[in-house]
Amino acid sequence: MTNKSLLIVGYTALEGTLDLIRHYAGRLYGRLPAFFMENAQRRIEEEIKNSRLIDGAFVESEHCRRIDTSVLDELWYFAEEQNIGFEATLTTIPLLQETIEICEALDMDPYHLKCGCGWIYATDDMRGIMSTGNSTGIKFITGTKTAADTEEATDTESGHGVITTAIGHITGEKARLLHKRKTDMYLSKPQ
């Protein structure tokens, strides 16, 4: 399984972000504009709906796993199940800009928030996953560097759009290495 790309299908931390909006509404509305909060909640709910549509396109197999808990926990579980190691870049894990803003306002780490939807997928054929949705009417959109680019791609697609992002690759070793901006860290076992 070495040299396969490690993909995330769908945005991460969506359900966790909705939970933050519900539980910390007072603090958030005091720090972020009301129109931003209303639009954020609507956008996140729409992305959850779109991501749940892909559940029918995938079945859990030996090379994919549904992301129910946090993305970092699920990456660990995926690697354990597969008996693999990987290298991934933390900043390429797909997050909505709204999630980033809300987490910054609350001094929270978005990578530890509950996802509730989306998939981790290992493949050596990116085109294979992109064509998976053809029979379901789902458009898989290749991840881009900025939230604005992703938003534009989603708006111009017909049907439902679900972001698909290559975050790293499978290695022949057991280490689970995450590259951060200036440092590297090994993924630790979920608690």
Image (tube, rainbow, N blue to C red):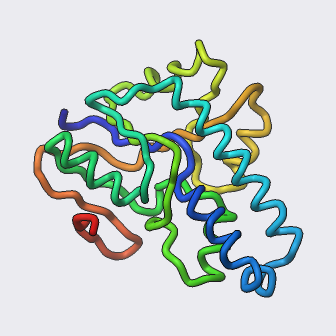
- Which of the 4 image quadrants contains residue 182? bottom left
Question: At 59% across and 37% down in the image, what residue appears?
Answer: 52
Q: Nearer the viewer, residue 63 or 152?
A: 63
- In the rendering, at what x and y percent does residue 133 appear? 57, 21
- In the rendering, at what x and y percent does residue 87 appear? 27, 54
Question: At 36% across and 60% down in the image, what residue appears?
Answer: 72
Q: Left or right: where does residue 47 sit relative to residue 41?
A: left
Question: At 68% across and 79% down in the image, what residue appears?
Answer: 24
Q: Left or right: where does residue 97 sit relative to residue 73?
A: right
Q: Left or right: where does residue 103 sit relative to residue 168?
A: right
Q: Nearer the viewer, residue 185 or 78?
A: 78
Q: Quadrant of the N terminus?
A: top left
Question: At 24% across and 61% down in the image, what residue appears?
Answer: 177
Q: Up-down: is 127 above or below 112?
A: above
Q: Residue furthest right?
A: 35
Q: Quadrant of the C terminus?
A: bottom left
Q: Up-down: is 115 above or below 100?
A: above
Q: Up-down: is 55 above or below 7?
A: above
Q: Residue furthest front?
A: 23
Q: Nearer the viewer, residue 51 or 146?
A: 51
- In the rendering, at what x and y percent does residue 83 appear? 14, 43
- In the rendering, at what x and y percent does residue 57 appear? 51, 23
Q: Residue furthest left?
A: 173
- Which of the 4 image quadrants contains residue 35? bottom right
- Which of the 4 image quadrants contains residue 21? bottom right
Task: Count how many numbered circles sit on residues in the image.
Answer: 0
